[in-house]
Image (spheres, rainbow, N blue to C red):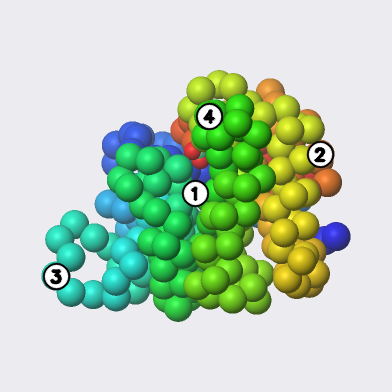
Amino acid sequence: MDRKPLIAGNWKMNGSRASARSLLDGVLQGVQSVKAAEVAVCPPFVYLADVEAMLQGSPVAWGAQNLSPEESGAFTGEIAGSMLNDFNCKYVIVGHSERRTLYGEDDALVAKKYAVALEAGLIPILCIGETLEEREKGITEDVCARQLKAVIDEVGIAKLGEGVIAYEPVWAIGTGKTATPEQAQDVHAFIRSQLATEDQGVADKVRIQYGGSMNAGNAKELLAMADIDGGLIGGASLKAEDFLAICTAAG
Ligand code: PGA
């Protein structure tokens, strides 16, 4: 299947205006040699204007880490999809496990955000994945299926083909404990098979990224797996050299 891998940096709440600029300088210097992957960065909201100015016309796309499920109105502290459009974001992450666990985002809210992102013309990167406790209980597939189903129920299977899925085992995020390529591949194949039960075309087309302590040292093995179509990179996206090494490993 011809799915161009997507390597996306999730900067989370890190850095400063100055460090964001120097990180992008570094990425721009090396990105010309990345041929086989699409590259994107997701900075904190407040740096989007700078990021847009620096990246427009370059091969690097950009996006946000979250959006409001509402279009506009009295929602203090929230950011609407249309506002992300003002900065020409291509992507927006929805349902990251940190949003789910630290900010109480449930499946229904994540599904609404997925829908609103598409309506705004953004490509949602839908994060799903099990906690350590869920893996140990042997319910990894049930959890992923449930998280996926909430979105399919909200928008319909065809719209899953318009987004990107990121499988991120929660126990691997920021812990330095990566899923083995086989562990990740098993779940990726399961996710694709779930989609295939509803629509084979969507299953074949949708990119499923792996996320969770992917780094310059383990990226190649993970990205070599048949159903792993890129990575959502946290810690290792904060150093240009490491991030570029992962992008190159997608070759
Ligand atoms: P990590 O984060 O690469 O630092 O584990 C990945 C993510 O949370 O998207």
* Residue pictured at 72% horizontal, 59% vertical: 194
Badge 4 element: helix
Residue identified by numbered label 2: 224
- On the image, the x and y values in percent for residue 228 come to 74, 46
**Crowding at label 1, few (<14), some or many (≥20) Cα neighbours within 10 Å?**
many
Residue identified by numbered label 4: 133
Classify the position of the C terminus by image quarter. Answer: top right
- On the image, the x and y values in percent for residue 34 come to 70, 46
Q: Is residue 226 above or below residue 85?
A: above
> Disc 3, disc 4: CB below 8 Å?
no
Q: Earlier in the sequence, mark 3 or mark 4?
A: 3
Residue identified by numbered label 3: 74
Spatial separation of the CA atoms under disc 3 and disc 4? 38 Å
Q: Which mark is residue 41?
A: 1
Left or right? Give the position of 201 relative to 59.
right
Spatial separation of the CA atoms under disc 2 and disc 1? 22 Å
Label 3 sits on what residue type? Answer: Ala
Q: Earlier in the sequence, mark 3 or mark 1?
A: 1
Left or right? Give the position of 189 relative to 14.
right
Left or right? Give the position of 74 relative to 32.
left
Spatial separation of the CA atoms under disc 2 and disc 3? 46 Å
**Crowding at label 4, few (<14), some or many (≥20) Cα neighbours within 10 Å?**
few
Q: Earlier in the sequence, mark 2 or mark 3?
A: 3
Spatial separation of the CA atoms under disc 1 and disc 4? 30 Å
Q: Which image quadrant for residue 200?
A: bottom right
- On the image, the x and y values in percent for residue 215 come to 62, 28
